[in-house]
Image (cartoon, rainbow, N blue to C red):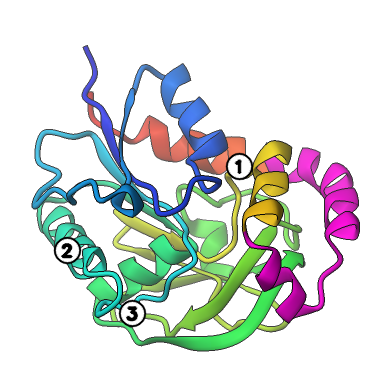
Amino acid sequence: MSRSVLVLQHAEPESPGILAEILHERGFPTHIVRPYRDEPVPESAAGRSGLVVMGGPMGVYEEARHPHLGAEVRLIRSALDEGLPIVGVCLGSQLLAAALGGRVAPGMREIGWFPVVLSPEASRDPLWSGVQSPFTPFHWHGDAFDLPAGCVPLARSERTVCQGFAYREQAYGFLFHLEVTEPMVRAMTGAFPEELAVAGVDRDGLLSEAARALPAMAGIASTVFGRWADRLER
């Protein structure tokens, strides 16, 4: 029997989505820990096949308000030391960057569907090689990170220099959302309407664009997450 993948989820609408579907198809169940429900963050991911860290509305630098963030950074460092495959999405990518010594700070807000351009290094990456560039994923973030030392840049957008990176082909951080489905996008707009208002984003327009953008994005998600899942140890 395969070992499960540990998932840290920070908000009800921001589940592993497509990634969880791919993992389950390949025989990897997910064990989801929800710190926003006061579920304790494990000290180690030893015995798991991989670690996935999802998005959320808080900032990495808000540990005083959200003490679990410090525990998550320590968990990620432990998983890095153990050589465990890791994927961080949005807040998860920021936590991964922080665990690797990178700077995370408020950046240019991106909410909606914006093109991402892959780097030359992405064409040689085992997850991203052959993926069409540019492509249009879903974005919902106000923070950004500098590329951590020892990491390879994978993607950028017009507003954000570093949208994705890889560390030793072991750990991947994606600031954009590849994992979302239409119900997830709809749930996020319902859960965080104040963020849409601050960004000046029309909810109906965002959902209308989702119907056009999701099929192509889902194909890329299946490729990238499928390749990551294929690298997990059973």
Q: Residue at x 29, y 61 (%)?
A: 168
The residue indicated by pointer 1 is: 221
The residue indicated by pointer 2 is: 71
| Residue 187 point in image, percent of width and height | 66, 46
Q: Quadrant of residue 184?
A: top right
Q: Residue at x 17, y 49 (%)?
A: 40
The residue indicated by pointer 3 is: 62
Q: Which residues are magenta?
A: 192-219
| Residue 75 point in image, percent of width and height | 16, 57
Is 207 covered by the magenta stretch? yes
Q: Quadrant of residue 66?
A: bottom left
Left or right of residue 158: residue 172:
left
Residue 44, numbered circle: none
The three-letter amino acid code for the residue at tag 1 is Ala
Q: Nearer the viewer, mark 3 or mark 2?
A: 3
The one nearer the camera, 208 or 115, is 208
